[in-house]
Image: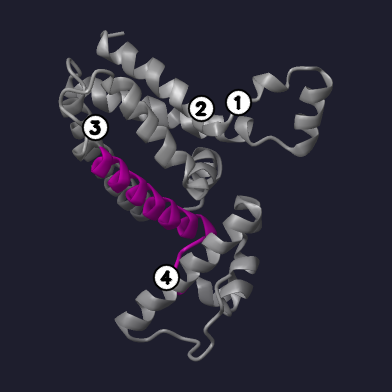
Amino acid sequence: MTEPDTSWQRARSPEQIAERRVSILDATGDLLDEGGVEAAGLNAIARQVGLSKANLYRYFESREAILLELLLTEFRRWSDEVASDLDTMDAEHTAPIEWIARRLAARHAARPRLGMLFHALPGIIEHNISLETAIDFKTNALALMEGLSGRLERNIPGLSADSAARFLMHWLMAVCGAWPHCHPHQVINQAMQHLGKADLMQPYEETIYAMAVTMLHGVQRGL
């Protein structure tokens, strides 16, 4: 858990402002890890970082802007990891789609913050933000996706640039919806066990891996 730093209450220099923003993001990440998006309210974030709720607005325009910045950080790290994996891929790999789909899914599943935030993105996080914040987020996110889709195009025979971009957009949309279904409330797990259907509750990584394989084969065939 992040320890709040109360040695100075108002950041004045650019360095102090940057430090305070990082501390707010760290505190928010801790709350996400402990209780999900619902636990990361402004009051909780303020308590965690040792600020008043009003002071948070000196650094971020809203709770959603904090979550958006945290999502972008996690998305960038995931994208960098996948890009690094693709750089090590053997050009003569006999099953490039399955290998790439596994790396996409495994890297994503290893970042639960990213899964939680992606699920909350369209319904919660992309609300209560300014146009400037929205443009900045979309600019950065689309740049990351463009870089990654370019690498997919180079690593999968027959995949066009348009198809690679389309796959990545559609797969990430599917990932948004997969998170809550693969992380149901305990009572749902118990109900599925009672009905003898527990085998239908697939792990998150395997679910998004299967999605990636199916979609990649589809776009490769021009579907």
Q: Which element is circle 1 on? A: loop
Mark 3 vs mark 2, foreground winner is: 2
Looking at this view, is 213 or 141 the one in front?
213
| Residue type at the position of mark 3 | Ser
Q: Are marks 3 and 2 in contact (CB under 8 Å)?
A: no
Dot 3 or dot 1, earlier in sequence: 3
Q: Which element is circle 4 on? A: helix
At 81% from the left edge and 30% from the top edge, which residue is drawn?
190
Dot 4 or dot 3, earlier in sequence: 4
The residue beneath circle 4 is: 22
Answer with the quarter of the image where residue 34 lies: bottom right
Mark 4 vs mark 2, foreground winner is: 2
Q: Identify the image quadrant of the N terminus.
A: bottom right
At 31% from the left edge and 8% from the top edge, which residue is drawn?
223
Distance (Cα) linking label 4 and label 1: 35 Å
At 21% from the left edge and 38% from the top edge, which residue is drawn?
88
Q: Which element is circle 3 on? A: helix
* Whether residue 125 is situated above or below residue 40 in the rendered picture: above
| Residue type at the position of mark 4 | Val
| Residue type at the position of mark 2 | Glu
Answer with the quarter of the image where residue 107 lies: top left
The residue beneath circle 3 is: 149
Distance (Cα) linking label 4 and label 3: 29 Å
Q: Which residues are magenta?
A: 58-85
Neighbours of disc 2 within 10 Å: few (<14), some (14-19), many (20+):
some
Dot 4 or dot 1, earlier in sequence: 4
